[in-house]
Amino acid sequence: MIPPILISVGTFGNAMTIFVLLHQKKMTSTALFLIVLALSDTLMLFSGLLPAWVRYTLVIDILWLSNTGCKAQL
């Protein structure tokens, strides 16, 4: 059961990164790049790892449960 641990630790770490970088006195281009990187990493956690874990544990492909999910898979 590694994916739930990765999702929770990854989300917490990315949230802390965003929190720390947004509370700087001066916003630099490096800080902005790291914020966008943390957001994209969180998006990948929830769009890639979460559906794979649900598919493995529940034997249900959540992308096929709705028309939107089916279109999003393509």
Image: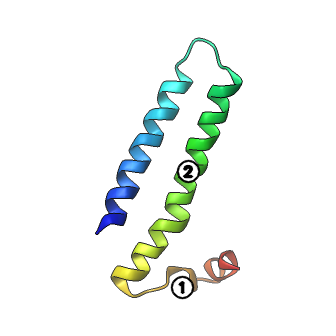
Q: Is residue 63 above or below residue 37?
A: below
Rounded to the nearest whole Å, what is the CA distance between mark 1 and mark 2? 25 Å
Quarter of the image with the N terminus is bottom left
Which residue is denoted by mark 1 in the rendering?
65
| In the depicted structure, whether residue 62 falls above or below residue 7 | below
Tell me residue 43's x, y (percent).
Answer: 57, 55
Q: Which is more foreground, mark 1 or mark 2?
A: 2
Amino acid at dot 2? Asp
> Where does label 2 land, which residue?
41
Q: Secondary structure at mark 1?
A: loop
Which numbered disc, 1 or 2, marks the residue that appears first in the sequence? 2
Q: Secondary structure at mark 2?
A: helix
Judge whether 67 appears above or below 41 on screen: below
Classify mark 1: residues with Cα within 10 Å, few (<14), some (14-19) or many (20+): few
Residue 65 or 30: which is nearer the viewer? 30
Quarter of the picture holding the C terminus: bottom right
Q: Amino acid at mark 1?
A: Leu
Front residue of 23/28: it is: 28
Residue at 54 percent across and 85 percent down: it is 65
